[in-house]
Image (cartoon, rainbow, N blue to C red):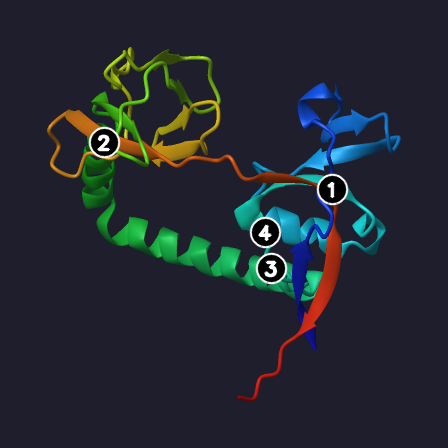
Amino acid sequence: MKNQINLNIKTPCQEKFSNFTPTTNGGFCNSCTKEVVDFTNWTPNQIALFFQNKNNLNTCGQFKNTQLTSYSKPIKQNKKLNLVSSIGLACLAFLSFFTAQAQDSNNITKNTSKTIKQLNQPILIKGTVLDDDGLPLPLTNIVLEGTNIGTQTDFDGNFTFPNKLNKGSVLVFSYVGYEAKKITVTDPDNKKTVNLDVTLNNDHYILMGKVAVKEVFQSKHK
């Protein structure tokens, strides 16, 4: 059974992606008159799903060097079976929830209120951003995911986020030439102030060109 997809670019393109006309998925190359898909921010599962579609096998793309590797094919699930299972699980969850409420509704209310209060405690985020050589990265962008709220590091790589955040908020750290990094806000000791030491990895290795796609056979036997 062919359950893996191997990606590589045999002949990297000499064109500059930054010169392309922006498109929905990347940029349009006038030399080869086709769209070049920018995969650099895609997840492994998104890449695997894209190339599982046979219509996408003649794609030209831009990748990080680490993305040109083997990907497991996502397993297609039976939609009818999933629907029946979902309905069954929903009914079971509803009955369990109803029974629990009937037995101890007061405790549930108290515990829920306490949990919500703890989750909503605002947290001050401070820290330092360094490169992979341990040197500070000044003017690194730090943004609350899904918003335009953010700040930048100073010339020593230090920052203090302007807004206090809740647990579970996601901060995106980005700097030109480095891989962006997402960090989820946590406060395990409930100190209400969290100091982050963030390291961004150099991302000079970006390749562009026509993607060679090969399906890989994997045996279950050693």
What x and y, as percent, mark residue 84? 63, 63
Q: Is residue 83 visible?
A: yes
Q: How many marks?
A: 4
Q: CA distance from mark 4 to mark 1?
A: 21 Å
Type of residue at label 2? Asp
User: Which quadrant would residue 36 be assigned to in this image?
Assistant: top right
Type of residue at label 4? Asn
Tag 4 or tag 3, which sits nearer the N-term?
4
What x and y, as percent, mark residue 172? 41, 27
Instruction: Label 3, secondary structure: give it.
Output: strand
Instruction: Label 4, secondary structure: give it.
Output: helix
Residue on which the image places disc 4: 45
Q: CA distance from mark 3 to mark 2?
A: 31 Å
| Residue 209, label in figure | 1
Left or right: 157 as drawn, with respect to 95: left
Q: Nearer the viewer, mark 2 or mark 4?
A: 2
Circle 4 packing at 10 Å, graded few (<14), some (14-19), many (20+), is few
| Relative depth, front residue between 91 and 35 | 35
Residue ranking furthest to the bottom: 221
What x and y, as percent, mark residue 143? 40, 19
Tag 2 or tag 3, which sits nearer the N-term?
3
Type of residue at label 1? Gly
Q: Nearer the viewer, mark 3 or mark 1?
A: 1
Q: Are marks 2 and 4 in contact (CB under 8 Å)?
A: no
Residue on which the image places disc 2: 197
Circle 3 packing at 10 Å, graded few (<14), some (14-19), many (20+), is many
Instruction: Label 1, secondary structure: give it.
Output: strand
